[in-house]
Image (cartoon, coloured by chain):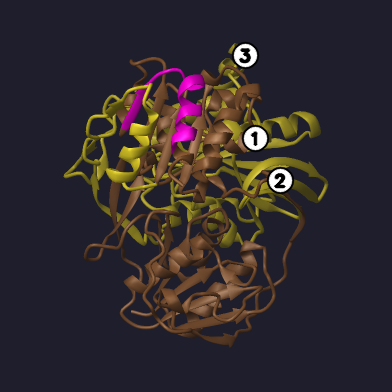
Amino acid sequence: MSVLVYIPTNGGQATKSGLEAASFASALASGEVSAIVSGDLSGDGGLGAVGVTKVLHYSTELKDNSQLARLVESAATNTGATTVVFSRNLEGGAIAPRVAVRLGAGYVPGVVELPEGASFSRNVFSGKAKAAVSVSADKTVLGLTPNAYGVKSTGGGDASVEAFSAEVGESKLSFGDFKPSSADGSVPLPEAERVVSAGRGLKGPENWRIVEDLARALNATTACSRPVGDMGWRPHHEHVGQTGVTIRPDLYIACGISGAIQHLAGVNQSKVIVVINTDPEAPFFKAADYGIVGDVFDVLPKLTEAIKALS
Amino acid sequence: MKLLVCISKAPDTTSRIAFTDGDKNFDESGVQFIINPYDEWYALVRAIEIIESSGGSVTTVTVGEASCDPVIRKALAIGANDAVRINTVPTDSGQVARLIANYADGQGFDAIMCGKETIDHNSCAVPAMIAECLDLPFVAFATSLEMNDGSAILTCEAAGGTNSVKVTGPFVLSAAKGMSEQRIPNMRGIMSARTKPLQVVEADEVLVSTSVDKFTLPPAKGSCVMVDAENPAELVRLLREEAKII
């Protein structure tokens, strides 16, 4: 089976989620693993090291998912790939379904691990269940959940890089300014490996410094509960939960969040959950791996110091 | 403006998740169904706000059986003008998207608006697939929308921030948090919803390319290890030595 993987780049190198998708594609493939890159690429973008053998490079940076879908379809046809892998982040999640329609492929989003036999395991019901999905079409498009599989080096040599051209059509979208959500350049929430999140227990936006200090010590991204976003204490994009962002970090630290079921739906796929709350009856403790019953205003500074003492 | 909003039913967040028919299907017994929150709070409400200020109509479309009618009536109570239900059991994103695209094709909708995902299957697939079936531009994870004659300005989520996007001509969007606020239907809306048109059409034969072999529930979470509030260093030790994540 020949596999194609779509790779976004940053500064000419494959992004972390791209490397993760490429690692997954390499483990899945029994034949050649090709990558398609649109835009900036230096060398092989770091893709040979995760098992990619050939990189098709389309030199213009496309932003429109319609054009990107045509590009990926063209690359799949060119390489004879029967499976196309995307990281299902904001960008990949918009292109992959279009590619599935173009190729007449079955689309399996939210894949978290390598398939057992012919069926792919994916998370459903906000992580409260898994579904084993099989594809009856000749081709398969997979959307890999970010931070689920990990980047796995194969120790391979450099991949070959070929210039690639394709008919991608006109774009009816014109993109204006990109506004970064945080000035500090922290990792976006869906891709973050560590997240420190806080809720109403913080009592007011002026108290967030202790949350930010802990996040900085852990090199984590900050998040918040829905009431905190709705009251304007924190920006909307930090809201994790049912109607906000769904995340899957290695470590999720919830400070002063009771753990309503809507909140849990957005975070229960985290590998390790730590809950800090004054209320020993807070429902979040039932979903936690580690818990501290205590006042966040006492516990967080001490925890931050203990983490700083490690390094 | 002529707007189409895709509405799906979804189990209420607090529903017990269980499976039936040899774990092949979701067990709907005793489950309260709601309008999928992303479809309702963001796509539908924003569409209604737009026609309230600029005129026009909002049609909702749903792929499903008669069990969807209560949530469709709720969408009409919130303020949609009329509704269409494509009568079949939805089993696959590609099938749902193709059916909606077949219905919408040639009807002159200025925008087709969807929630970013449903809270049961979490696929985020149908909106982009509708766009591809109709060869329309697609704006994913939109957090604001302003429509003018022949063009629209949107804000959408992008890695680490937001982008502003202008689109010319008809388009498809998937709506995320920020687009609008939840609206509770008033009594007048609920009364008028009873008589608004809900057209049921039979589904075309379309290809289904994926199927669920089996659902499984994750193993129960082990008990939470409690650490003394006076000793957060112990938590750090556990995270490092036991969980091995820092």
User: Residue at the location (56% across, 53% down)?
Assistant: A90
Chain letter for the residue marked with disc 1 in the picture = B
Q: Residues within 10 Å of mark 3 (few under 14, many from 20)?
A: few
Q: Residues within 10 Å of mark 2 (few under 14, many from 20)?
A: many
Q: For numbered disc 2, what is the local secondary structure? A: strand
How far across and how far down the image is residue B162, in percent?
68, 47
Magenta segment includes A291 = yes
Q: For numbered disc 1, what is the local secondary structure? A: loop
Q: Which residue is mark 2?
A: B155
User: Residue at the location (75% across, 28% down)?
Assistant: B52
Q: Residues within 10 Å of mark 1 (few under 14, many from 20)?
A: some
| Residue B28 vs residue B80, the one in the foreground | B28
Q: Residue lying at the far top in this picture: please name it.
A: B187
Q: Is residue B146 left or right of residue A135?
A: right
Chain letter for the residue marked with disc 3 in the picture = B
Instruction: In the picture, one chain is brown; tell me its letter.
Output: A
Earlier in the chain: of badge 1 and badge 3, it is 1
| Residue B230 vs residue A262, the one in the foreground | B230
The boundaries of the magenta stretch are A290-306
Q: Which residue is mark 1?
A: B178
User: Which amino acid is tagged 2?
Assistant: Thr
Earlier in the chain: of badge 2 and badge 3, it is 2
User: Which amino acid is tagged 1?
Assistant: Gly
Magenta segment includes A289 = no
